[in-house]
Amino acid sequence: MPTENTEVVQSEVRLYEIRPPQGIIDERYQSERSFTSNAYDPSRTKVAITPPIISPHVPGNETYEFGCLYPFKGFIYPQVCHAVHTVKRVIMMAISILRFKPFASVALSLFIIPKLKYIFLWLVVDAFNKWCYVVLRDYILKERLFCTSARELYRAGIKYAKGYGPYKREIVEKFTITICMIWEYDNSYRYRGQDLFGILNKKEFLKRPLKEFLRSWDIGIDREMAEATIERRREFIKGKKGAIGKRIIVRNFIIAYALIFRKSFKEFVTVISSLNFDLMKLDHADLYMCSNRSDYHFDGKNFFDRMNERIAEDRKAEETRQQIIKNENDIKVKEASISKE
C-alpha cells in the first residue's frame, strides 16, 4: 500500500483491499457450468456477494459487490481465471522466446520468404487455437454473455472472419474467441486495454497506425506503477535517459511484426479501426470499479486521486439515500397524523 499524504481514510481503503482466503464456488457449476454461485476475482481482491444478473433482454451479465455503487461487468470464476491465465502465459512465453538468438534466427529465416512466412503464420495460429480450445472449451461464453468491450471485440473479429474461406475463417473465429476470453476474464489486461483505447486517437491511427499505436503503448507503460509489474515489463518500456529498461523485445516485436507481416498488420489495423472506441474505452462504472487498484494510473490519475473521487461519490450517494429515507419517513409521519385527525 503506498504511503503518501492523502485524504483517503485508511479504514475505507482497507475495505477494498480484503483478499478472501479462497474462491467460493458451488458444485453445480463444476457439473453443469451454471452461473449460480458466488466467486472471487484474485486480481481485484474483491468478494462477489450476489450471483450475476443475466437478462434475456440485456446482453452481458453483472455482479454486485459489497460497498460498490456500480456492478462489475462480468462474473469471475476462479478456475476460468486460471485457464485463461494459462493461455496468456503461453502467449507471453512464445513472444519472450524471440529474445534468444537461435530462436530469433530460425523465425527470421522463415519470415523472410514471402509466401512461406504467411503459411507459417497461419499454421502457428491454427495450432495455438487448437491448444487453447482444449484449455478453454468448458468455459467459452456465448457472445451475449461477454462484457460490453469484449462483445465489441467479438463482433469486429467475427465480422472480419467472414471475408475468408472456410479454413481461415475458422482460424480467425477461434482466435477471436480466445482473445475475448482473455479480455473478459483477465481484468488487468481488460482495464489496461480499455485505458489504451481511451488514449488511442482513431484519426491518427488510420493515418499512421504504427506510430500512433506505439505512442499509446508508451503512455500506457508509463502509467504502470507496481514494482513487480515494472520489473517484469522492463522490456516493454521505451528507452529514455535515466529510465528503466530499453527499447527491446516487445516494442521491437510490434515494429518487426508491422514491417515483416505488412499484409497481416494492415488487417490488424482494419479490425481495430472497425471497433467502436466509445464501447472499448473505460466508462465511469469501469473507472469506479478499478479505482482501488494502486498498480496503474487509470485515466492518468494516481491511486489516491481515484480513491478520493470514489469515496466522495460513495459519501454523496449515501447522503442522497439517507435524504430519500428521511423524506419517505416524513411523508409517512404526515400521513399518519392526517389519518388520526
Image (spheres, helix red, strand yellow):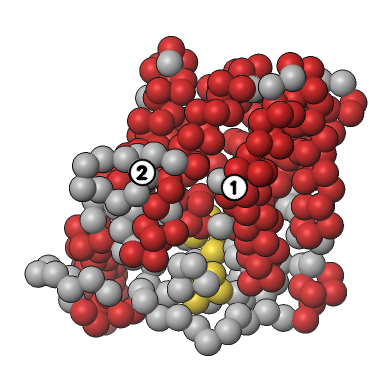
> Which residue: 78% across, 39% down?
124
Q: Position of residue 305 (x, y in %)?
A: 19, 58
Q: Position of residue 256 (x, y in %)?
A: 55, 28
- Residue that badge 1 annotates: 100
Q: Nearer the viewer, residue 278 or 262?
A: 262
Q: Position of residue 41 (x, y in %)?
A: 54, 70
Give, as a three-letter code, the residue at label 2.
Answer: Lys
Q: How many marks?
A: 2
Crowding at dot 2, Cα within 10 Å, few <14 / some 14-19 / many 20+, comes out as some
> Which residue: 59% across, 36% down?
152
- Residue that badge 2 annotates: 246
Residue 63 location, quadrant: bottom right
Image quadrant for the N terminus?
A: bottom left
On screen, residue 193 versus residue 290, left or right, reads: right
Alpha carbon distance from label 1 to label 2 = 16 Å
Residue 190 in view here? yes
> Which residue: 34% across, 53% down?
224
